[in-house]
Amino acid sequence: MSKRALTILVLSLATVLSASLPFGAFADESQIRLEPYKNFEKDWKLVTVRFRKDTGELRFTYANPVAWKHMTARLAGKTKDPYPKGAVFAKTGIATGEDASFPSSAVPGGVRRFQLMIRDEKKFAHTDGWGYALYTEDGKMAPGDAKQAALACAACHKIVPERDFVFSVPMAGLAPKSSLLSLPASKNWSFRDMEAKALPGNVSQHLPVGSQSVRVLEGEITRHVFEGTLDEVRPLLSREASRAGKPAMLLSQDAKRFSLVFAKPEAGKSLIKDAKPCAPGEAIFLAVAGAVDGGEQAVKDTVKVLQFCYKGE
Ligand code: HEC
């Protein structure tokens, strides 16, 4: 056998091997460090800012030069190619606090967490070519199974395949509003009716009294649900609950976690003493999320209830 033929044989063997290995072989999300990108707020382009009314969190999304160049070219219709290797998006979530000297204007109250999306089609083929990682305030990898978290991140980002799984679009210029709320109906998710009594474990006990059925989210997103999903999915559920006039929920496919949103019965009455009233046109909504009990006890987190004001579309 010639030397060249041997090289080809070795190369194809490597390809066969890598294809048959489980996807973790070349990508270990727990190894994605924030360190190389730590100056992103100074050095990269600020793509957009978001504010989550329900959690009071400000979000800033930045693009590195490779990601920014490609994003603007895509939006200008100059290319439909996927993002190139080396494109990175970083996002910070910052809690807001009150400015004592001017309470109606909220101020950033410290960094809460960081998220990264790193493009490498081969390494992260199992999550649509993006490596996802989440960090705590001190820049350390968030606790928990990094691979499972990445699958959960990708499951939600699958909502926007036409944008190559990137939600954000630049604040000014070419872009339409970027929002889960303004997304056109996507093939990746839909809602269907489910009878309240068919819900597993204790879930139906969280529904408003007299609820016959709920709108249940279907799609890839229900396959990989981590704690963050329960929170991130709330805007989508709020919109559906408001549109359908009944509770909307995400139930993970393994029936271990749920996130539920509905307009509060006796709409005027706040659960929170001395809460600020909702603005005109808004209603009080409740979000209940956590572990389904009665099933396997693998997920140990508790059920959290949140009240917020929501204005339907
Ligand atoms: C349930 C949906 C959902 C989940 C789960 C989710 N994201 Fe996102 N992500 C969004 C939405 C919506 C945006 C844009 C709006 C915003 O920033 O609030 C976004 C924006 C981002 C951005 C900025 C680039 C972009 O796509 O706009 C990064 C980086 C990011 N997410 C990383 C992550 C990581 C890492 C995880 C998992 C730890 C994760 N996301 C989980 C919905 C989700």
Image (tube, rainbow, N blue to C red):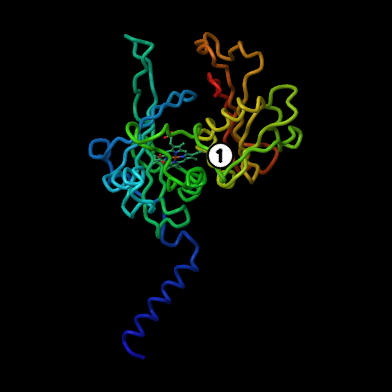
Q: Tell which residue pokes out farthest to the bottom in this image.
A: 1
Q: Tell which residue pokes out farthest to the left in this image.
A: 43
Q: Nearer the viewer, residue 211 or 182?
A: 182
Residue displayed at 36% across by 14% down: 105
Answer with the quarter of the image where residue 9 lies: bottom left
- Does the closest atom of ligand 1 sit within 8 Å of the Cβ of label 1? no
Q: Nearer the viewer, residue 161 or 276?
A: 161
Where does label 1 land, which residue?
185
Residue displayed at 49% across by 24% down: 54
Classify 276 as above or below 75. Answer: above
Q: Residues within 10 Å of mark 1 (few under 14, many from 20)?
A: few
Q: Tell which residue pokes out farthest to the front in this image.
A: 77
Which amino acid type is shown beneath numbered disc 1? Ala
Give ligand 1's quarter of the image.
top left
The quarter of the image holding the C terminus is top right
Query: Which x, y percent locates residue 92?
Result: 36, 34
